[in-house]
Amino acid sequence: MKAEVEEKVDFSIIRYAQCWEDADILLEALDIQEGDVCVGIGSAGDNCFAKLIKNPKRVIAIDLNASQIACIELRVAAYRNLSYPEFLILLGSRTGDSRLKCYELCRGDLSPTVKEFWDNRKHLIEKGIGGLGKFENYFKLFREKLMPWVHSRKKIEALLAPKTQEQAVEFYDKKWDTIRWRFLFKIFFSRFVMGRLGRDPKFFSYVQGSVGDKILGRTRHALRNLPPHENPYLYWILNGQHGTALPLALREDSFHKIRQNLNRIEWHLGSIEQIFSKQGITVVNKFNLSDIFEYMSNEIMENLYELLLNCSTKGTRFAYWNMLAPRSVPEKFKHRIHSHTSKGQELLLKDKAFFYSAFILEEVL
């Protein structure tokens, strides 16, 4: 059985070369315990790797896109074979001229299909594998083509310099939030531009209202209320690499914990329905569902939610984001779910990946 979005969207390319969802709030929400079985949407693998820090029994990464599976498999090999500085260089988080050498150190651990995938992209590996997705290229266009018309490099560096929150609010209000910034931002992050250059038009099938206005509002919150110099997602968008702040799975202490637990992660190509059936998955304690419900009709979401419930036990948690389309537990199943609404809102206020309008945390009763 194919997922609804699988029938509409081209999954032959790398869409996300890194995960644009904040694993810090995800792990706080899921409260993973030793012995838990965790299921997550694969993407480039970062948030599934982050779960390994908590010593779960099993982490199952699932993705519809073979290119995303190739990203995950190469990262597994990188965690296993590279030093920490080499790992960051291969990903593109740090500059370095040894990326192909780093790849060669990983290559022997790749399956034949994934090895062929990356061998055909060696010229791209030299740029850093964390920047190769369609979404990352969209931000590259933003950084290189739009930002020079909005703010100088000096002002961007000032935005990312350490500040108190009061100073950050004053800087945004008085120096950053110009008419040109708001106008060009809303055009670049409109449904039309973002759908064609960043995501896919079909990802917006169930979105209502102005996409640009919603994302601008969340960006305003992040730049005023979350320290910009501690935000790895903002730093990458504006500089094309990470600064001193890194996403959870890329931090040095995380790197070593993840390496120790690599035998606990597995990755599968297909829909959740297909993989659960094929692998005989019957009990899951923690679900990271990214924002997949946004790409589904309410009817299809209800069917998938029922499948997840059938593989759940008391205390199983579902964590997922809404970017633009509102989604939460279907009415049919509300009597079986406790919605941690306040906790979800609290975590959203700390979410450094600031594109999302809601963070949903639900628990099986």
Image: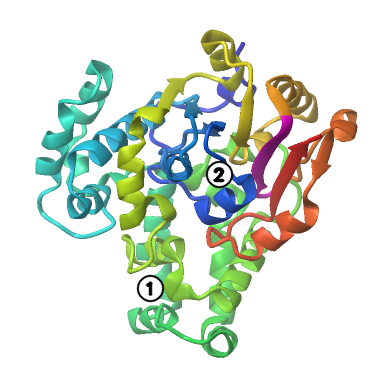
**Crowd rating for badge 2 (residues with CA inside 10 Å; few <14, some 14–19, many 20+):** some
Quadrant in the rendering for residue 173? bottom right
Q: Is residue 257 magenta?
A: no
Mark 2 or mark 1: name the one nearer the start of the chain: 1
Residue 52, placed above or below residue 358: above
Q: Amino acid at mark 1?
A: Pro
Residue 324, placed above or below residue 365: below
**Is 90 left or right of 142, judged from the image as shown?**
left
**Residue 195 numbered mark, or none:** 2
44 or 193, nearer to the observer: 44
**Crowd rating for badge 1 (residues with CA inside 10 Å; few <14, some 14–19, many 20+):** few
145 or 324, nearer to the observer: 324
> Residue at image x 85%, y 31%?
336
Q: Which residues are magenta?
A: 314-324
Q: Amino acid at mark 2?
A: Gly
What residue is shown with label 1?
A: 148
